[in-house]
Image (cartoon, grey):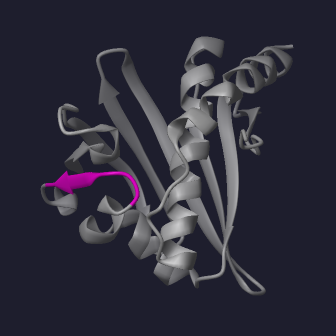
Amino acid sequence: MTTTPTGTVTRIDGQLHLLHERRFRARPEDVWRALTEQERLERWIGTWEGDPAEGHVTFRMTAEGDDVAAERIDIRTCDAPRRFEADFGSPAGVWRIGFTLSAEEGGTRLRFTQGLRDADEASSSGPGWEYYLDRAVQVVDHDDTDFAPWSDYEPMADHFVAATLRAEG
């Protein structure tokens, strides 16, 4: 069975962005820790090294396997437990991610964005963030790491390409 995509592509300040939302039963402070603390982050996506107070860290996506290279992350905004924004460096260039957390009755709403260059980038990043954000919810709300396989998310690529083409409109 294939997971249904929930993310979309929208324009923010004139630029294309992936937009994903998730709801957590946990409080914003708990979700923040799962998204930023080394030990908790590692359970669903990866690890970081360095001193965030210096404005950057090195991040490695351990969920991608043991041979994934570390990338520099430049922290642009860190307003715990509400807002985070950072630039990831990669061979393809720099891309910006950000998230906001807001308390809602019964938990927390996460609004996650990533700036996009084109539909090709959306075809891989869109399903990728669906996968990782679902993993985050599973860890935070259920203390469970028996994740659905990546193959359940790969078919979402077409959804994100179509969403990008509509947003480019």
For the image, the number of numbered tags is 0
- Front residue of this view, candidates 60 and 141: 141
Asked whether, in this view, residue 68 is left or right of residue 32, the answer is left
Is residue 109 or residue 137 the one in the foreground? Answer: 137
Res. 162 image quadrant: top right
Image check: 34 left or right of 50? right
Q: Which residue is rendered at x = 77% and y = 26% of the image?
A: 159
Q: Could you tell me which residue is drawn at 25 percent across and 65 percent down?
A: 38
In the figure, 110 relative to 90: above or below?
below
Q: In the rendered view of the protein, which quadrant contains the N terminus?
A: top right
In this rendering, the answer to whether 136 lies above or below 45 is: below
User: Image check: 159 left or right of 150?
Assistant: right
Q: Position of residue 16 (x, y in %)?
A: 68, 26
Above or below, comparing residue 104 to residue 166 in the picture = below
Whole-percent x and y of residue 36? 36, 65
Does the segment drawn in magenta span residue 48?
yes
Can residue 64 be seen by looking at this rendering? Answer: yes
Quarter occupied by residue 120: top right
Question: Start and end of the magenta stretch?
Answer: 44-49
Q: Nearer the viewer, residue 49 or 127?
A: 127
Relative to 148, say whether 67 is above or below.
above
What x and y, as percent, mark residue 83?
Answer: 52, 63
